Image: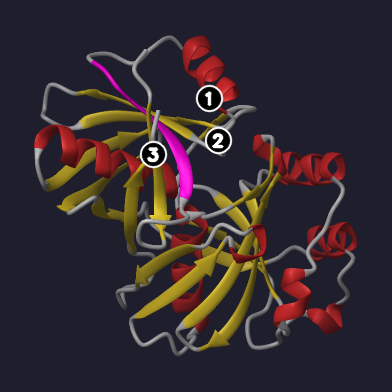
Amino acid sequence: MNVQHIAAFSDGPRGGNPAGVVLGGALPADDQMQQTATALGYSESVFAAPLPDGGWRVRYFSPAAEVPFCGHATIALGAALALAHGDGVFELAINHARITVEGRRDGALVQAALQSPPTRSTPADAALLAEALALFGYVAADLDPRLPPARMHAGADHLLLALKHRPALAAMRYDFEAGRALMQGAGLATVSLVHAEGAQRFHARNPFAGGGVYEDPATGAAAAALGGCLRDRGWPHGGAIDVTQGEDMGVVCRLHVDIPPVPGASVRVSGSARIMPA
């Protein structure tokens, strides 16, 4: 199996969230995909095979299980497809939606952009919120009242906790097994911890214990869901936001989110991808 190693949402030639990318004539067996993702140890790996209509059938696996959608692995896939087939927009069939990814070569990098599945958000359940605050050692006074806790979706579910102060985000710690139980029990891909530096600039961290990873350095699916949630809440995003993630892990990642005005519509998440040595 030929695995490409591509870091998505890089900070130019540095940083980014690594993903394993496998392009083939047919998808491998489920157990082979899971074994490959587990062995690689990246937060997600993506597997793609061509469809008769010219699109690509795509599946995503974390080290622990299959996941319904992964943004950073989709960006990495867009880079791999552009390198293999030339610049363009590629149709993708994921488990529960049809989306697209665009890849365009830019020197040693590839610029890539995904169109997310439809978005939605609802206020966070009080019991889930209480459990999440206890997990991270936060209290209600740590939360930013301008952006109340929410369950948000863009291909996968995430719990949004917006923190009032940047140091509280930097101090994020939690018990891994307790986090795994919470996220798997609630059907969450990640908990999305964010701090609004301004109306259009966010810092983010994404614990991903349900997928077998303590923290994801860049989370395109959560960024897409955040964009949809900000639209639902009437946040003054001005049509786009920038998200910096991975700073507190020492791996800077940069995500740009374009937010159209139509409620529930797909959002566009873009960034750079760099090819890593095998």
Tell which tag, 2 or 3, sits nearer the viewer: 3
Q: Which residues are magenta?
A: 17-24
- Contact flag, marks 3 and 1 (Cβ < 8 Å): no
Dot 1 surroundings within 10 Å: few (below 14), some, or many (20 or more)? many
x 53%, y 11%: residue: 31
Residue 30, compared with residue 163, is above or below; it is above
Disc 2 marks which amino acid?
Tyr
Q: Are marks 1 and 2 in contact (CB under 8 Å)?
A: yes
* Circle 2 crowding by C-alpha within 10 Å: few under 14, some 14–19, many from 20: many
Q: Amino acid at mark 1?
A: Ala
Compute the Cα span from label 3 to label 1: 17 Å
Q: How is the image coloured?
A: secondary structure
Q: Secondary structure at mark 3?
A: loop
Comparing 135 with 214, the one in front is 214
The spot of residue 13 in percent (x, y) is 36, 56
Locate residue 47: give its quadrant.
Answer: top left
Residue highlighted by disc 2 = 42
Left or right placement of residue 9 versus residue 113 in this view: right
Viewer-nearest residue: 10 or 262: 10
